Image (cartoon, rainbow, N blue to C red):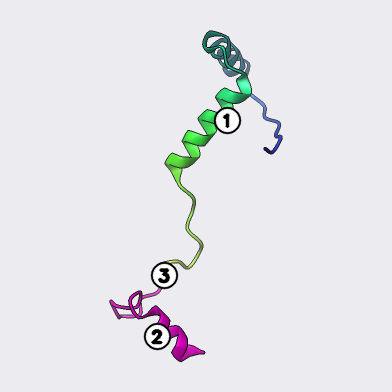
Amino acid sequence: MVKMTIRLDPAVALALEQMAQAQHRSQAELIRDALSAYTKRGGRPLPSGLGAYDSGESDVSKRAEEILADAA
């Protein structure tokens, strides 16, 4: 795991502390779970240029090996 430092508003810090106590879990565990759910829901950004080009051919994925062999 990577260690990080975050700053929270006092009200959020208090709510987190109370949730951790009520659920008998650590604050770090609650934060990890929340961030994991958030990042899975949001997805990762696509690399720039991905999907920006259109070859005009609909079977490129089926012919990928042939196309790469021709290019080599």
In the rendered structure, the answer to whether residue 64 lies left or right of residue 28 reads left
**Residue 30 at what x, y percent from top left?**
56, 23
Q: Is 34 a magenta residue?
A: no
Q: Are marks 1 and 3 in contact (CB under 8 Å)?
A: no
Report helix, strand or loop for mark 1.
Answer: helix
Q: Nearer the viewer, residue 24 or 46?
A: 24
Marks 2 and 3, Cα distance to the nearest angstrom?
A: 22 Å
Q: Is residue 68 left or right of residue 25?
A: left
- Reply yes or no: does residue 64 show up in magenta: yes
Q: State which tag comes first along the sequence, 1 or 3.
A: 1
Amino acid carrying mark 2 in the image? Glu
Residue 5 image offset from top left, x and y in percent: 71, 31
Circles 2 and 3, Cβ within 8 Å, touching? The answer is no
> The residue tagged with tag 3: helix, strand or loop?
loop
The disc placed on residue 32 is: 1
Residue found 60% across the figure and 13% down from its top: 17
The Cα–Cα distance between marks 1 and 3, rounded to whole angstroms, is: 35 Å
Tell me which amino acid carries mark 1: Arg
Mark 2 or mark 3: whose residue is earlier in sequence: 3
User: Residue 20, which numbered label?
Assistant: none
Seen at 63% across and 24% down, the residue is 28
Q: Crowding at label 3, few (<14), some or many (≥20) Cα neighbours within 10 Å? A: few
The residue to which callout 2 is attached is 66
At 61% across and 17% down in the image, what residue appears? 13
Part of the protein shown in magenta: 51-72
Q: Position of residue 10 (x, y in %)?
A: 63, 16
Q: Could you say which quadrant of the image residue 50 lies in?
A: bottom left
Query: Magenta-highlighted stretch: main secondary structure?
Result: loop
Identify the amino acid type marked 3. Answer: Ala
| Residue at the image position 67 percent from the left and 37 percent from the top | 1
